Amino acid sequence: MKKTLLFLLALPLAADERLLSTLWTQTASEYRGAALQAYRSATVMLDRALADVTWTAALEQKPPFGKLPPAVILDADETVLDKSPFQARLIRAGAEFLQPAWDAWVAESAAQPVPGAAEFCRYAASKGVTVFYVTNREAKQEAATRDNLRALQFPLSDKVDTLLLRAEKPEWTSDKSSRRADVARRYRVLLLVGDDLGDFLSGVRVSVEARQALASPQDRYWGTRWIILPNPMYGSWEDALFGHDRTLSREEKLRRKLESLRIAP
């Protein structure tokens, strides 16, 4: 009986390395604290940015921009919307990411807000700042995503399309730079808020070392112009560990992750 119990307890942990990160996101007070901290920092920086017409957060912003109306750009999943229940579904089912399952989840419009996100976005809107959501959800998912945001009382403009999805235009690829540039042509971008390096920079689907070389020259932006949310569950950081090759088997991905661990001498 004891051996059987130990086997049952060990099986989920051995079967899915996503378990701990998803549980942390869903249950840890530390996660909630980190999210609230990020959005409270964003609120302070928003006021600072509004007062400084030389301030921009978008590397795509071209001068002159001081007289442009202000905007902020946020990602959707794991930035304003909590996708962890979808991750939990995959874990419980022992499944990998599949497009039909993701489409079904999005269609439910049931995601809850990341702590602090809705309050920050409403505060920005109250200051006359246009809130843009730049997400790699697909264009076909716009209506469901809009319904989800609206149900949670996130500000959505009736005059401007502020929900910019992947492939909504031919040039809008998963690299968000073209969408940030589109916003930056019309608005002064005060803040970028996201959970993935691609929410801030272009060309992030490279090696771990190349990502670090790309990001480190912009270190001064973190916590001021760029506000990042914690996401240990998934992202381009994980894909970098196995060369962004999603055709690899689950076992091969895990092997490469293990090889990436640093072990103290």
Image (cartoon, rainbow, N blue to C red):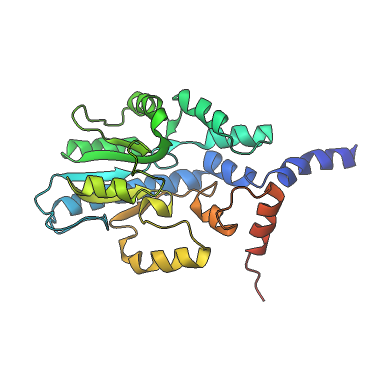
The x and y percentages for residue 184 are 21, 49
The x and y percentages for residue 107 are 46, 24
Q: Residue at x 44, y 25 (%)?
A: 109
Q: Is residue 114 visible?
A: no
Left or right of 168 in this view: 29: right
In the image as oriented, which residue stretches furthest toward the bottom? 265
Left or right of 174 in this view: 259: right
Q: Quadrant of residue 200?
A: bottom left
- State which quarter of the image contains the N terminus: top right
What is the tally of numbered marks visible in this picture?
Answer: 0
Q: Is residue 232 visible?
A: yes
In the image as oriented, which residue stretches furthest toward the front? 170
With respect to residue 141, does 58 lie above or below? below
Left or right of 185 in this view: 119: right
Q: Quadrant of residue 220?
A: bottom left
Q: Residue at x 83, y 42 (%)?
A: 6
The x and y percentages for residue 211 are 46, 63
Q: Residue at x 35, y 29 (%)?
A: 149
The x and y percentages for residue 185 are 19, 48
With respect to residue 181, does 170 lie above or below? above
